[in-house]
């Protein structure tokens, strides 16, 4: 039995197969619509989420399966003091696969060691968010036709943004990727990630000005400032509008640069950018459902050749 804790749990070849499956699902939705009849997905969300949880639920329903779960720790037995390991033992009796989001780093990992069913990390604190990364990679691969040879700018809250940490981790395995980290001083990328890049000799630069690097980017990954992980409101207020991507800045970008964002967006991308063909963050949401469908099929070991 397999779980998904980090995007690195799958080899590059396995990811390719997963993305091929997701692209086939995109083209042949009907073929997969009964693939998970009789199976149940539990969504255990100890932290607020709409997109990720609904994306998982939509994925399972599109496969003909069913969903159950909770969307807030206060309405689960965690409020009574139940441990994650007890919860997953119980969930293992109620469902076939579980997607778990938790504010504590490593909680889904702890759950997986006590689980009889596959556990998917749907975001753990400021640590990892592997299914968002699968979504990001599928979007890039589908729209650009490759996952190598890119200069990618990651902009915003690089300190607390778990989607950023997961994406860097995953892209580091492809050839000729250059990272450009754009953040205010206070929200710089964690040192352990930089050490990792240095160790692998992967080129990166850290800058404050987005305008300055815009012309050389093939991909721009915008992120919101993660209010819930700040220690005080003043710092948040000071930093929240540090970057606002608008039409003016888009003029500086390549004609085929893609703008991605894991969403929710706050102010960091002006709505006037939404109509720009290079803005693909809403397409990304759709790819998120396809890749989660492919992931559920893969972890449940459903033989898709028989569909
Ligand atoms: C991201 C997350 O939860 O980390 N959202 C998501 O999964 N779509 C990004 C964010 O909350 O900023």
Image: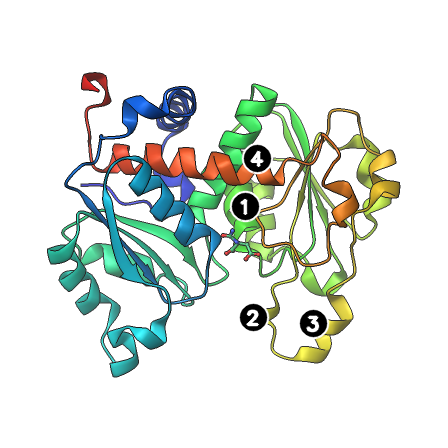
Residue occupied by mark 1: 196
Find out whether the residues at labels 2 and 1 contact each other: C-beta distance under 8 Å.
Answer: no
How busy is the neighbourhood of tag 1: few (under 14 within 10 Å), some, or many (20 plus)?
A: few
Looking at the rendered structure, the number of numbered marks drawn on it comes to 4
Q: Please tell me how crowded label 2 is: few (under 14), some (14-19), or many (20+) other residues with Cα within 10 Å.
A: few
Toward the viewer: 291 or 13? 291
37 horizontally vs 98: left or right: left
Residue drawn where x is 61% and y is 22% of the image: 144
| Secondary element at image label 2 | helix
Label 4 close to label 1 by CB (< 8 Å): no
Disc marking residue 283 = 4
Q: Residue 228 carries which label?
A: 2
Mark whose residue sits in front, 4 or 3 = 4
**Circle 3 residue:** 236
Query: Quick one: label 2 or label 3, which is nearer the N terminus?
Result: 2
Of badges 4 and 2, the one in the foreground is 4
| Observer able to see residue 170 | no
- The residues tagged by marks 4 and 2 sit, at their Cα atoms, a distance apart of 26 Å
**Nearest to the observer: residue 40 or residue 84:** 40
Label 2 – label 1 distance at C-alpha: 27 Å
Label 2 lies in ligand 1 vicinity (Cβ under 8 Å): no
- Would residue 238 be visible to someone looking at this image? yes
Mark closest to the chain's N terminus, 4 or 3? 3
Q: Where is residue 221 in the image (x, y as percent from the top left)?
A: 65, 42
| Quadrant assignment for the N terminus | top left
């Amino acid at each position: 039995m397999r779980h998904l804790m980090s995007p690195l749990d799958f080899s590059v070849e396995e990811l390719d197969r997963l993305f091929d499956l997701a692209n086939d699902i995109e083209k042949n939705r009907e073929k997969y619509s009964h693939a998970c009849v009789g199976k149940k997905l539990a969504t255990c969300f100890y932290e607020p989420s709409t997109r990720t949880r609904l994306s998982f639920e939509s994925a399972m329903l599109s496969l003909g399966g069913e969903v159950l779960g909770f969307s807030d720790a206060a309405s689960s037995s965690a409020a009574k003091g139940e441990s994650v390991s007890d919860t997953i033992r119980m969930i293992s009796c109620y469902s076939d696969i579980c997607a778990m989001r938790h504010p504590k780093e490593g909680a889904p990992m702890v759950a997986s060691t006590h689980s009889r069913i596959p556990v998917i990390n749907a975001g753990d604190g400021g640590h990892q968010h592997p299914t968002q990364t699968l979504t990001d990679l599928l979007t890039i691969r589908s729209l650009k036709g490759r996952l190598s040879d890119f200069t990618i700018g990651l902009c915003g809250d690089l300190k607390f943004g778990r989607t950023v940490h997961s994406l860097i981790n995953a892209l580091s395995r492809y050839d000729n990727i250059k990272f450009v980290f754009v953040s205010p001083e206070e929200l710089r990328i964690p040192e352990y990630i930089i050490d990792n890049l240095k160790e692998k000799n992967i080129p990166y630069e850290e800058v404050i000005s987005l305008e300055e690097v815009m012309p050389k980017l093939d991909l721009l990954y915008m992120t919101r400032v993660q209010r819930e992980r700040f220690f005080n409101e003043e710092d948040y207020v000071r930093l929240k509008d540090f970057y606002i991507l608008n039409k003016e800045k888009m003029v500086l970008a390549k004609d085929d640069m893609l703008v991605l964002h894991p969403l929710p967006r706050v102010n960091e991308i002006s709505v006037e950018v939404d109509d720009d063909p290079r803005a693909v963050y809403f397409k990304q949401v759709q790819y998120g459902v396809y890749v989660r469908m492919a992931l559920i099929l893969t972890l449940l070991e459903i033989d898709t050749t028989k569909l």
